[in-house]
Image (spheres, rainbow, N blue to C red):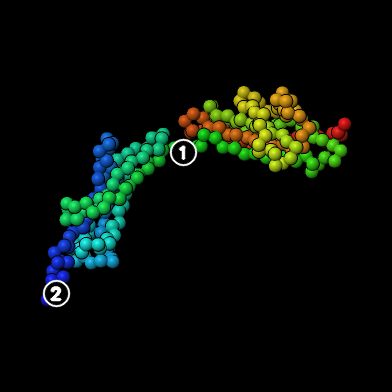
């Protein structure tokens, strides 16, 4: 019958489906070693006759969706001071010969110690109008700071920005200096004046940029900083 003919044709096209890892020939490592196991889990929509050996779908019709569970491990690559990346493919294969699909895999081996960002920053805005009267202006005094640690090769870059409004602070050119060699305290007025910035502007932003060492294995630890000012009458 016509029905029997269609069934026979469908059965004729059935194939066994398995999955395998492939080595990336561009590297000196066999990436297949990262695969711990490949397990055939289930199928659908579509039709397979069953699962053989836990890894192969048996006699599946074309278009059947199959589900593999893949477990990874790393006992072949030792961590170094830098992260390592390995790319390869998992191939879905029909009848052990025909590649039906290729799924990209990326394995990241993290460094053996944490890498800090090259730098990180924290800032605080000071609004003298909260404390000074309408006929007064701030006289910015000393900036002092304390660190928990300052490992060799690390530093803190300080940035001072002064402006007539709070909104103008981010776009103001900073007056910068670095510790070390500079040590606490510093005279804010002297730093601003040396850069041609008036010392009586009502808003001040102090930014601490903490900078890691060259291999990013250590970073300074800042405990606190403090800015002082007094209100003086305007002339």
**Which residue is located at x 19 percent, y 52 percent?**
98
Q: Nearer the viewer, residue 180 or 64?
A: 64
Q: Position of residue 132 (x, y in %)?
A: 82, 40
- Disc on res. 2: 2
Q: Position of residue 5 (x, y in %)?
A: 13, 71
Q: Is residue 178 left or right of residue 113?
A: right
Q: Position of residue 131 (x, y in %)?
A: 81, 41
**Which residue is located at x 28 percent, y 57 percent?**
68
Residue matched to label 1: 114
Q: Is residue 131 left or right of residue 113?
A: right
Q: Nearer the viewer, residue 11 or 55?
A: 11
**Which residue is located at x 60 percent, y 31 percent?**
156
- Tell me the quadrant of the picture where the C terminus can be found: top right
Q: Earlier in the sequence, mark 1 or mark 2?
A: 2
Q: Residues within 10 Å of mark 1 (few under 14, many from 20)?
A: few
- Tell me the quadrant of the picture where the N terminus can be found: bottom left
Mark 1 element type: loop
Q: Nearer the viewer, residue 88 or 222?
A: 88
Q: In this view, which residue lies farthest toward the front?
A: 2
Q: In this view, which residue lies farthest toward the bottom?
A: 1
**Which residue is located at x 31 percent, y 52 percent?**
71
Mark 2 element type: helix
Image quadrant in which you'd find residue 59: bottom left
Q: Is residue 12 left or right of residue 180?
A: left
Image quadrant in which you'd find residue 113: top left
Question: Cα distance, mark 1 to mark 2?
Answer: 68 Å
The residue mark sitting in front, 1 or 2, is: 2
């Amino acid at each position: 019958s016509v029905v029997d003919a269609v069934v026979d044709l469908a059965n004729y096209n059935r194939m066994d489906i398995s999955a395998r890892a492939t080595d990336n020939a561009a590297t000196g490592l066999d990436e297949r070693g990262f695969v711990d196991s490949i397990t055939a889990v289930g199928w659908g929509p579509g039709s397979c006759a069953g699962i053989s050996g836990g890894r192969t779908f048996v006699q599946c019709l074309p278009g059947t969706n199959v589900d593999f569970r893949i477990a990874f491990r790393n006992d072949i690559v030792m961590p170094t001071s830098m992260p390592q990346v390995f790319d390869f493919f998992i191939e879905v294969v029909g009848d052990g010969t025909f590649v039906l699909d290729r799924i990209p895999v990326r394995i990241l081996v993290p460094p053996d110690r944490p890498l800090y960002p090259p730098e990180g920053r924290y800032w605080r805005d000071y609004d003298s109008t909260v404390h000074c009267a309408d006929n007064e202006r701030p006289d910015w005094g000393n900036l002092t700071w304390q660190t928990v640690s300052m490992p060799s090769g690390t530093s803190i870059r300080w940035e001072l920005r002064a402006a007539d409004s709070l909104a103008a602070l981010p776009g103001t050119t900073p007056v910068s200096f670095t510790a070390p060699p500079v040590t606490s305290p510093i005279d804010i007025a002297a730093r601003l004046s040396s850069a041609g910035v008036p010392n009586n502007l009502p808003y001040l932003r102090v930014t601490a940029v903490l900078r890691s060492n060259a291999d990013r294995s250590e970073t300074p630890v800042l405990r606190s900083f403090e800015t002082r000012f007094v209100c003086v009458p305007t002339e």
